[in-house]
């Protein structure tokens, strides 16, 4: 478990440099340590933009948008940490960038988020803002926003949704290939029925 947490945290902490400093990772880090790290994340606008730029450069990325004034966001922050560890434990073959931004102080227009390709299109299709302070999760593939969802989730819910979103995205990316390639790439994400039947309470702190 120590090595797992170390691998997971290396990915997270690399996105959270403040003032040119990169935090030191210890193998003993727990989910509580991760939450402490989240709490110390900069709310600076340029830092947020840098994290989102990093997310956009990943093949697939998941971003948690935190609002310090929201009880739901505080609850989901813990679930996101559990999801992070659970996903890498269960599906290490699927490289996904996990990112955390604290947007508590950047204003209600969320300019940095709206700069992401696909954000305004999704917003227009829904006819409403995408951020409501519910601990929203943003899924991106090849730099483009695919989905934004808030609400109370379990770590297992998030893992299933992530498999579904990125499975559909990979099939879409492969639409110009042969039919066999499309089916194969989608099955790579959607396979493993044992994962789909996992208990919502399996993530351990």
Image (cartoon, grey):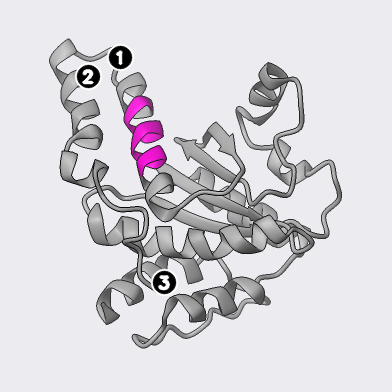
Residue 182, label in figure: 2
Within 10 Å of the Cα at label 3, are there few (<14), some (14-19), or many (20+) other Cα atoms? Answer: many
Q: Is residue 192 visible?
A: no
Q: How many marks?
A: 3
Residue range in magenta is 160-168
Residue 175, label in figure: 1
- At 22% across and 19% down in the image, what residue appears? 182
Within 10 Å of the Cα at label 2, are there few (<14), some (14-19), or many (20+) other Cα atoms? Answer: some
User: Is 145 located above or below residue 48 in the figure?
Assistant: above
Residue 179 sits in which quadrant?
top left
Report helix, strand or loop for mark 1.
loop
Instruction: Quarter of the image for the N terminus: give it.
Output: bottom left
Verify CB contact (< 8 Å) between mark 2 and mark 3: no
Instruction: Quarter of the image for the C terminus: give it.
Output: bottom left
Q: CA distance from mark 2 to mark 1?
A: 6 Å
Q: Of callouts 2 and 3, which one flags the residue occurring earlier in the amino acid sequence?
A: 3
User: Is 46 located above or below residue 27 in the figure?
Assistant: above
Report helix, strand or loop for mark 2.
helix
> Residue 154, position in %: x, y?
45, 52
Q: Is residue 115 visible?
A: yes
Q: Nearer the viewer, residue 80 or 176?
A: 80
Q: Of callouts 3 and 1, which one flags the residue occurring earlier in the amino acid sequence?
A: 3
Report helix, strand or loop for mark 3.
helix
Residue linked to disc 3: 9
> Residue 187, position in %: x, y?
19, 29
> Residue 201, position in %: x, y?
36, 60
């Amino acid at each position: 478990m120590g090595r797992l947490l170390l691998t997971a945290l290396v990915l997270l902490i690399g996105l959270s440099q403040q003032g040119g400093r990169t935090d030191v990772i210890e193998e003993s880090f727990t989910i509580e340590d991760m939450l402490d790290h989240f709490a110390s994340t900069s709310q600076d606008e340029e830092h947020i933009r840098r994290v989102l730029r990093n997310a956009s450069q990943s093949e697939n990325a998941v971003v948690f948008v935190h609002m310090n004034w929201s009880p739901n966001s505080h609850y989901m922050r813990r679930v996101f940490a559990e999801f992070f560890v659970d996903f890498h434990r269960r599906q290490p073959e699927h490289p996904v960038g996990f990112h955390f931004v604290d947007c508590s102080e950047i204003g209600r227009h969320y300019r940095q988020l709206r700069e992401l390709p696909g954000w305004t299109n999704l917003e227009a299709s829904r006819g409403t803002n995408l951020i409501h302070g519910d601990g929203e999760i943003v899924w991106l593939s090849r730099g483009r926003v695919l989905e934004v969802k808030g609400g109370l989730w379990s770590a297992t819910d998030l893992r299933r949704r992530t498999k579904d979103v990125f499975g559909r995205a990979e099939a879409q990316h492969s639409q110009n290939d042969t039919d066999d390639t499309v089916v194969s790439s989608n099955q790579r994400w959607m396979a493993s029925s044992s994962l789909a039947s996992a208990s919502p309470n399996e993530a351990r702190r």
